[in-house]
Image: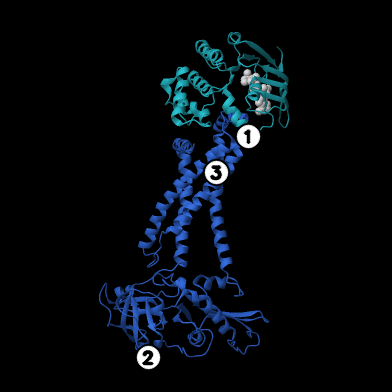
Amino acid sequence: MIHLKNIEKVYRTATVETVALNNINLSVEKGEFVSIMGPSGCGKSTLLNIIGLLDEPSKGKVEIGGKHTNGLPDSQLAHFRNQTLGFIFQSFHLINDLPVLDNVELPLLYRKVSSSERRRLASEALEKVGLSNRMKHYPNQLSGGQKQRVAIARAIVGQPQIILADEPTGNLDSNMGNEIMDILTTLNQRDKATIIMVTHDENMAKRTHRLIRLFDGSQVS
Amino acid sequence: MLLNYLKITFAVLQRRKFFTFISLFGISLTLTILVVATAFIDHLIAAGYPEINRDRSLYIWNVKEKDTKNQGQSSGPISFSFINTYVRSLKTPAKIAAVSMPSTINIYLNNHKLNVRYRYTDSNFWEVTSFDFLEGKNYTEQNIANNDYVVVINDYVRDEYVGKGQPAVGKMIEIDNVNYRIIGVVRGCPITRIHVSSDLYFPYNTSKADLKKVELRGNFAAIILPNTPSDIPKIQTEFNVVASKIKLTDTGDKWFKPDKLYVSADSYITSFTRQFKGDGEDDGVGYFFTIVLGIALLFMSLPAINLVNINMSRIMERASEIGIRKAFGASSKTLVMQFVIENIILTLIGGVIAVFLSLGVIYYLNNSNLIAYIDLSFNWKVFSVAIFVSLLFGLLSGVYPAWRMSKLQVVEALKN
Ligand SMILES: Nc1ncnc2c1ncn2[C@@H]1O[C@H](COP(=O)(O)OP(=O)(O)OP(=O)(O)O)[C@@H](O)[C@H]1O
Ligand SMILES: [Mg+2]
């Protein structure tokens, strides 16, 4: 499903050069649930962004679903992100100007889906994360855990084949964290979604099929 | 999709009230000034009471003599005898009116004086123009043949001199120690109708000047109204032939011996624009419109740049929204569309506000006495200019910032 070859990411500023990722080779099969762990600043988010086509590697190849993504034109990248990928960000990234329901509808907005169908699917997704009573709220009227669940609803509403989750439980207490893990596990088992999740929590990592450890931009296991 | 853009637009405009207010304020103010200015230019150029035949008429009022060796020139209005000798010699059938440049004079009432403008005209003047006679009638060829001392006054003079709404025809009016019989009262027209507006109109026989004197320069203008508009080019060519045979003034001055003469029968606007270009050979219309367009663009560019700036910071502020939308499948093209539509809606709202503001300003100008008799109109021409300019504004100020932002890498945008 996902193949990374010799991925390198270097951030250059006027004075310093940061190697965020160094020669990463990684394959994730269809239906796998993989977790990524490592100390802060080791390059976990960077790696996830590259897999999610939100960022370009300085070197190396990214292949998703049998397709080379390097140098794809903007319109095709957009199509890919829309159809295949669902992202859950470390810091939620909801649109504060729009109510919860509209936030969740977002991925469907860029597909040919009627507005009533969008409404139906978005409410369904919100129900799955237990937030159907907050549809008309605005993001800044929600708690951290609620925002995280809106972000999850948004990532799953379009039923993407791949879900990329950057510390989806990082801001939550362990109860809430377990609930979120349950949701992800269900998505993986029932909907056969391929999931890559960054986490700091060994217990969460234990609930996945495979654990990848990063250290200073390199894969150590 | 469009419905969605609209929804997003209104949500954003509503939630960012301060920004919306600032933008709308700037847009509507600029457009209002633009619309009122356009209405004013339209008022100056287009046919209007009582010169409703302006578009079908030709004007001759300036003659220029040039000494190409000594680099000297002299120009000014044509004389009455010039009109009789040269303009009236045209063979193509047309009505030819002679009207003098306006002068001012005081009329003394019981205990205050009234400063008024007056002109001398021939009887044809009343046929090429379409004055509304509130009372009485115009003077005719017969009045002039009889050397009648008659005068046509406007309602302003009547109201001041005779009394508001009082009958005036038949009454005598003393002007500069001469008594005139009031023969007609016309509804006045704004001073901006440069060749026809006046408070008093005298038949030319009452003029103290020697109108028969043979000279090129004087203080008259000729208005030519052809029987059919298709005769206009014919008359112009014919007049050029006549003009080429005119004998130049012998000044007797060795420093100024004119050897070239410029005079032509022009449309209303051309008769003015021709004066802009020094040589008189170029009709100056292109030049004139280039200048007007240049000023308009310059005037518009300031608020446009300002708007681009506001939009830039507004869109920058929404960088994370752009990042989020891209992460979930919005292409750069879609995003540019979204922001441009937002902007166009904003400017259109500004345009609608401007329409109402300009209606107010125009109503105020027409009804206050800032310029007597002024009749600005908010017509379709002005309206379409306003709409066109709003759209242009929306595009100009929206496309560039949106394009810049849509080029951002997703992670980059999300960082903000
Ligand atoms: N835009 C950038 N410019 C320069 N350096 C950057 C940039 N983004 C990230 N880095 C650097 O790249 C390295 C990896 O960052 P990344 O965000 O991937 O870490 P992380 O493993 O996700 O950390 P955390 O667990 O704290 O989220 C860090 O050293 C960071 O300073
Ligand atoms: Mg991170």
User: What is the C-alpha distance between the residues marked 2 and 3?
Assistant: 69 Å
**Closer to the camera in the image, B106 or B206:** B206
Above or below for B176 versus A39: below
Looking at the rendered structure, which numbered label has been put on residue A38?
A: none
From the viewer's perspective, is residue B13 above or below residue A144?
A: below
Q: Amino acid at mark 1?
A: Asp
> Which three-letter amino acid code belongs to the residue tagged 3?
Gly
| Residue A24 position by quadrant | top right
Q: Position of residue B357 (x, y in %)?
A: 41, 52
Please tell me how crowded label 2 is: few (under 14), some (14-19), or many (20+) other residues with Cα within 10 Å: few
Mark 1–mark 2 Cα distance, whole angstroms, equals 86 Å
Q: Which chain is cyan?
A: A
Helix, strand, or loop for circle 1?
helix
Q: Which residue is mark 1?
A: A74
Residue drawn at (68%, 15%), measured in percent from left and top? A214
Residue carrying label 3: B398
Protein chain holding label 2: B
Chain B rendering hue: blue
The chain under label 1 reads: A
Q: Mark 3 packing: few (<14 Cα in 10 Å), some, or many (20+)?
A: many
* Subunit ID for the residue under disc 3: B
Assign the C terminus of chain B to one quadrant of the image. Answer: top right
Picture quadrant of ligand 1: top right
Callout 1 and callout 2 share a chain: no
Residue B145's tag is 2
Q: Label 3 to label 1, Cα distance in Å? A: 20 Å
Determine if residue B67 is in view: yes
> Label 2 sits on what residue type?
Ala
Disc 1 packing (10 Å; few <14; some 14–19; many ≥20): some
